[in-house]
Image (spheres, rainbow, N blue to C red):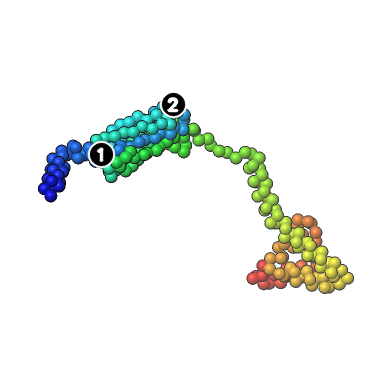
């Protein structure tokens, strides 16, 4: 019974006697493994600054390769901030990235994007971004748009004229041998809201006389100001 007690006491004493540095070393993280993918080719390197627990370490990673960085002050569970301090010429640097440390090496993947209109940053050289060209419509497209607009306007004007002409022809054939009935039909049609101006427009555009009975309708329209 005394031997197990003596062994337990010795183990507790050894843990208490362990220095803070040794305890930190025993709980040190596995660091960070950074993998860099370069979209401009395999030439070039990127330099990264990793900060955790108030201590920083630098590591240089080749394009399309990886490298690990450690620090004795880093402990598992802490948050490490990664900032890229250098990279291939004409690429955007990765900043303010975060990973969580563990007892094994935490993995961090990033890409070196070339400077462009989609990826811009202060470190991009002035000439690396393509100049935006002013876009202008070709003359033929402008002509087509104007022609289409004129076609729509003319169709909106001429379609009612064509419809009125078809209606007049229909009543003319229907009452071919009944002039009084045809005159009454034209009068009633002209008195319908919005029909009088269409009949006048047809007469002016086609240079045809107004249908019989239209004079009577005009007289009614002049007397009734509410009629359209």
Disc 1, SS? loop
Compute the Cα span from label 2 to label 1: 34 Å
Q: Is residue 217 above or below residue 11?
A: below
Disc 2, SS? loop
Can you tell which of label 2 and label 1 is closer to the viewer? 1
Residue at the location (24% across, 35% down)? Answer: 72
Residue at the location (47% across, 29% down)? Answer: 41
N-terminal-most mark, 2 or 1:
1
Residue 122 in percent (x, y) is at 38, 34
- What is the quadrant of residue 42 in the picture? top left
Residue 132 in percent (x, y) is at 50, 35
Residue at the location (43% across, 34% down)? Answer: 37
Q: Nearer the viewer, residue 184 or 5?
A: 5
Per the image, the residue denoted by label 2 is 43
Per the image, the residue denoted by label 1 is 28
The answer to whether residue 77 is seen in the rendering is yes
- What is the quadrant of residue 156 in the picture? bottom right
- What is the quadrant of residue 29 in the picture? top left
């Amino acid at each position: 019974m005394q031997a197990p007690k003596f062994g337990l006491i010795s183990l507790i004493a050894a843990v208490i006697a362990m220095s803070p540095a040794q305890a930190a070393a025993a709980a040190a993280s596995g660091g960070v493994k950074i993998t860099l993918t370069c979209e401009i080719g395999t030439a070039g390197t990127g330099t990264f600054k990793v900060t955790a627990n108030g201590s920083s370490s630098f590591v240089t990673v080749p394009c399309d390769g990886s490298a690990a960085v450690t620090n004795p002050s880093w402990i598992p569970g802490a948050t490490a901030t990664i900032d890229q301090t250098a990279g291939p010429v004409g690429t955007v640097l990765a900043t303010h990235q975060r990973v969580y440390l563990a007892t094994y090496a935490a993995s961090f993947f990033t890409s070196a994007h070339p400077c462009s209109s989609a990826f811009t940053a202060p470190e991009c050289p002035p000439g690396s971004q393509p100049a935006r060209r002013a876009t202008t419509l070709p003359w033929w497209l402008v002509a087509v748009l104007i022609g289409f607009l004129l076609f729509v306007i003319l169709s909106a004007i001429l379609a009612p004229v064509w419809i009125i002409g078809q209606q007049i022809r229909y009543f003319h054939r229907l009452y071919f041998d009944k002039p009084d009935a045809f005159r009454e039909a034209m009068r009633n049609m002209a008195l319908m809201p919005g029909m009088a101006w269409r009949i006048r427009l047809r007469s002016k555009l086609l240079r045809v006389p107004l249908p019989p009975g239209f004079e009577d309708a005009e007289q009614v329209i002049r007397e009734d100001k509410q009629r359209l």
